[in-house]
Image (cartoon, rainbow, N blue to C red):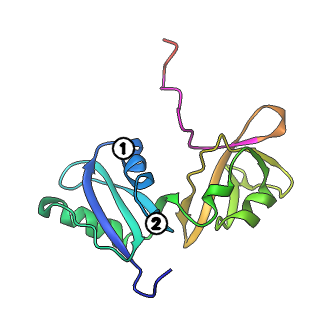
């Protein structure tokens, strides 16, 4: 990573997390770190912070959202060190060893045990919390955990 790397805020008006993820994953070269941020101004959308040496510009009307993303203290990480090694079923300990994730939590239950298996579904989106990258999980069948955020979540009331 170059000493000229810095966090840049980008706002292109992405309406969904999936749209923002797609834009991030299409960057070439891939950034070391890229996060999404939900912003409300000038309209609800997803802004992005990215560690980059290259300037990425936002339209003037979205500059305040880009600035908010660049200076935000939280974010949902799409690209982060080790993300490419978080595929398949891994133990909590393996996730912590293979990536920059600092902690794996069970929603409402605190830190997960190091030997507990996480079925990643090849889709891991940790959140920055208090300066640490934290993967929030939920219990699944067979004593396993799954990431709280799923690639293709079931819509609320899908069976109604």
Q: Secondary structure at mark 1?
A: helix
Left or right of residue 72, residue 109 in this image: right
Give me the disc on residue 130: none
Mark 2, residue position? 31
> Which x, y percent locates residue 130?
55, 71
Report the magenta residues as a range: 145-156
Q: Residue at x 36, y 44 (%)?
A: 19
Residue 19's tag is 1
Seen as rendered, the residue at the extreme top is 160
User: Where's residue 145, x and y in %?
Assistant: 74, 43
Question: Which of the two discs, 1 and 2, sits closer to the camera?
Answer: 2
Judge the density around disc 2: few (<14), some (14-19), many (≥20) Cα neighbours within 10 Å: some
Residue occupying the far right of the picture? 115
Circle 1 residues within 10 Å: few <14, some 14–19, many ≥20: few
Depth check: give the residue in front, 119 or 84: 84
Taking depth in this image into account, of 57 and 36 the one nearest to the observer is 57
Q: Any magenta on residue 20?
A: no
Answer with the quarter of the image where residue 82 lies: bottom right
Coordinates of residue 126 in the picture (x, y in percent): 57, 56
Q: Tell me which corner region of the image, top left, top right, bottom left or bottom right, holds residue 35.
A: bottom left
Q: Residue at x 38, y 65 (%)?
A: 49
The vertical placement of 34 against 118, above or below, is below
Could you tell me if residue 107 is visible in this image? no
N-terminal-most mark, 1 or 2: 1
Q: CA distance from mark 1 to mark 2?
A: 17 Å
């Amino acid at each position: 990573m170059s000493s000229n790397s810095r966090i840049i805020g980008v706002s292109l008006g992405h309406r969904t997390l999936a749209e923002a993820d797609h834009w991030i994953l299409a960057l070439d070269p891939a950034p070391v770190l890229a996060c999404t941020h939900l912003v409300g101004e000038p309209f609800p959308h997803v802004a992005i912070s990215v560690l980059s040496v290259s300037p990425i510009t936002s339209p003037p009307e979205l500059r305040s959202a880009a600035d908010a993303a660049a200076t935000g203290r939280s974010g949902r990480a799409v690209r982060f060190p080790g993300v490419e090694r978080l595929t398949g079923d891994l133990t909590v300990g393996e996730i912590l060893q293979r990536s920059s994730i600092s902690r794996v939590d069970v929603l409402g239950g605190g830190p997960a045990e190091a030997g507990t298996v996480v079925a990643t579904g090849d889709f891991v989106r940790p959140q920055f919390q208090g300066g640490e990258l934290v993967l929030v999980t939920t219990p699944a069948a067979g004593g396993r955990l799954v990431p709280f955020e799923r690639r293709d979540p079931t819509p609320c009331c899908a069976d109604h």
